[in-house]
Image (cartoon, rainbow, N blue to C red):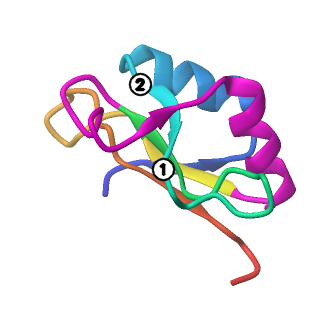
Amino acid sequence: MNDTRTTTSHEVIRRWAEQRGARPATLPGSEYDGRLGVLRFDFPGYGGAVLRTVDWDEWFATFDARRLHFRYQEQRPDGTPSNFNRLEQPDR
């Protein structure tokens, strides 16, 4: 990966997703104890039939409660925008 970055900044994450037309989402059926389960982004043309869109506040509340970090890439080696992203728990 070229220039892979990691952040916990809500502003950076939201900007990155919105620049790619992605919306915060979860995998239906992965919820537990009334909370979101698997966090994802729903990119245009991908996964929409499988993912359930959620609001940013709920997505970030889950992100923060789990103390996740967002690893992402701005561009591919050829300079085009990259959709690479991964949510990680730093203590795992």
Judge left or right: residue 18 versus residue 35.
left
User: Which residue is at the front of the view, 33 or 13?
Assistant: 33
Mark sitting earlier along the chain (2/1): 2
Amino acid at circle 2? Ala
Q: Which quarter of the picture shows residue 61? A: top right
- Find out whether residue 58 is within the magenta segment: yes
Q: Amino acid at mark 1?
A: Pro
Q: Which residue, given by chain and number where applicable, does mark 2 sit on? A: 22
Query: Residue 56 lies in what quarter of the image?
Result: top right
Q: Position of residue 34 (x, y in %)?
A: 78, 53
- The percent position of residue 48, horizontal first and vertical second, equals 30, 32
Query: Is 79 or 44 nearer to us in this picture?
Result: 44
- Residue 55: where, in percent of width, then height? 66, 24
Instruction: Name the outermost residue toward the right.
Output: 65
- In the rendered image, residue 3 lying in the magenta stretch gets the answer no
Which residue does the numbered mark 1 point to in the structure image?
A: 28
Q: Nearer the viewer, residue 45 or 70?
A: 45
Point 18% across, 26% down: residue: 45
Residue drawn at x 86%, y 55% as measured from the top left: 65
Q: Residue at x 27, y 36 (%)?
A: 49
Residue segment shown in magenta? 43-68
Query: What crowding class fits label 2: few (fewer than 14 Cα within 10 Å), some (14-19), or many (20 or more)?
Result: many
Q: Which mark is residue 55?
A: none
In the rendered image, the quadrant that contains the C terminus is: bottom right
Q: Quadrant of residue 46?
A: top left
Residue located farthest toward the left when viewing the structure as drawn: 78
Q: Secondary structure at mark 1?
A: loop
